[in-house]
Image: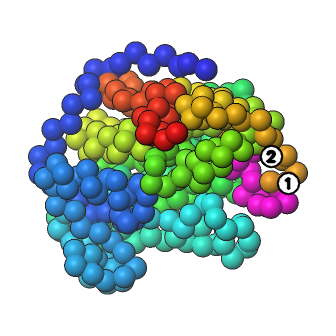
Amino acid sequence: MRWNISQGKFGNSVCIKAMTILIAGGTGFIGHALCRELSLKGHEVALVSRRPGAGTFTWKEIENEGLPNCDAVIHLAGAPLTGAKWTKGYRELLLSSRVNTTLTLVKAIERSSAPPKVLLNASAVGYYPPDPDRIYTENDLIMNGNFLNQLVRDWESAATLPLHHPTRVSRVRIGAVLGREGGALARLLPIFKLGLGGRLGTGFQPFPWIHLQDLVNAFLFALDHDETPEVINAVAPECITNRQFTRAMGKVLGRPTPFVVPALLLRWWLGDQSDLILHGQFVVPQKLVEMGFRFTYPTIEIALANLLEDIS
């Protein structure tokens, strides 16, 4: 499914002046790539972490001593949605690792005598309830849904500063991030290389995604543009299903994709976490496109060709 991606008014040039940027979650898959790109562009990067270290502030220090001097804050921290069953205890961890850390940063920004210019708070397209027919934009306001919907709503609500506060807040709703070093692609690649890849369930469930480099560029773009709205969808402009993703993987790798993982097996294995795989939503990056952001990897075949070009 192709969405109209005619460009808006600003273009994709990013010319941020050297900044000091505080990043929570900077050692993760997305954070590592973002820190590397920011450093290459001459910015000073400091991290918020549970463990002390050079150039690192602990959450306790932020809570007790306040925010260090910085021009921007990027919040990416949160327990992984995949890799563990969503028991009651893990659900609480998913919530607290996002909401509590966001509140810690927001309160520190409120207390700061020299608050940062911007807070970019990661979020997820799970804000939108699963729907195989509807295409969501940032203008859609959802009032009910499943656990993931509630988790994301609470997460975004925590990233709220008082009216007229000088710090600009943008919530970045991220889809499945495709990169060689982590995320969904790293988990699936060994299976597809063996010719054992296949669709999950019916395969008709939407699969909102974005290339890691486009996501990094979107964060840089949001840092550079004061016009960035309160919510942006960080997804590729091409809407695809799990079945289309599977076919594209097989085509780029030159491997068959004959297998099907039954929905019942996934539900038995993963429990409620299987909802991430068996259900989805079509989401488009309307706000980014209206502002003129240009995707380097707008289609799944272009993205996978780049990520898998030296794999046979």
Residue 273 shown in magenta: yes
147 relative to 254, above or below: below
Name the colour scheme. Answer: rainbow
Q: Are marks 2 and 1 in contact (CB under 8 Å)?
A: yes
- Quadrant, the N terminus: top right
Relative image position of residue 155 (x, y in whole percent):
52, 59
- Main secondary-structure element of the magenta-colored stretch: helix
Q: Which mark is residue 265?
A: 1
Compared to residue 286, the image places residue 196 above or below, namely below
Q: Is residue 288 left or right of residue 185?
A: left
Please identify the residue farthest to the right as the structure is shown: 264
Observer-nearest of 26 and 40:
40
Q: Tell me which residue sits at (36%, 30%) in the image.
A: 296
Q: Secondary structure at mark 1?
A: helix
| Boundaries of the magenta span | 267-279
Residue 146 appears in the figure: yes
Task: Please name the residue that numbered disc 2 is placed on.
Answer: 261
Q: Amino acid at mark 1?
A: Leu
| Camera-nearest residue between 57 and 118 | 57
The amino acid at mark 2 is Val
Q: Nearer the viewer, residue 303 or 44?
A: 303
Comparing 29 with 80, the one in front is 29
Q: Is residue 211 visible?
A: no
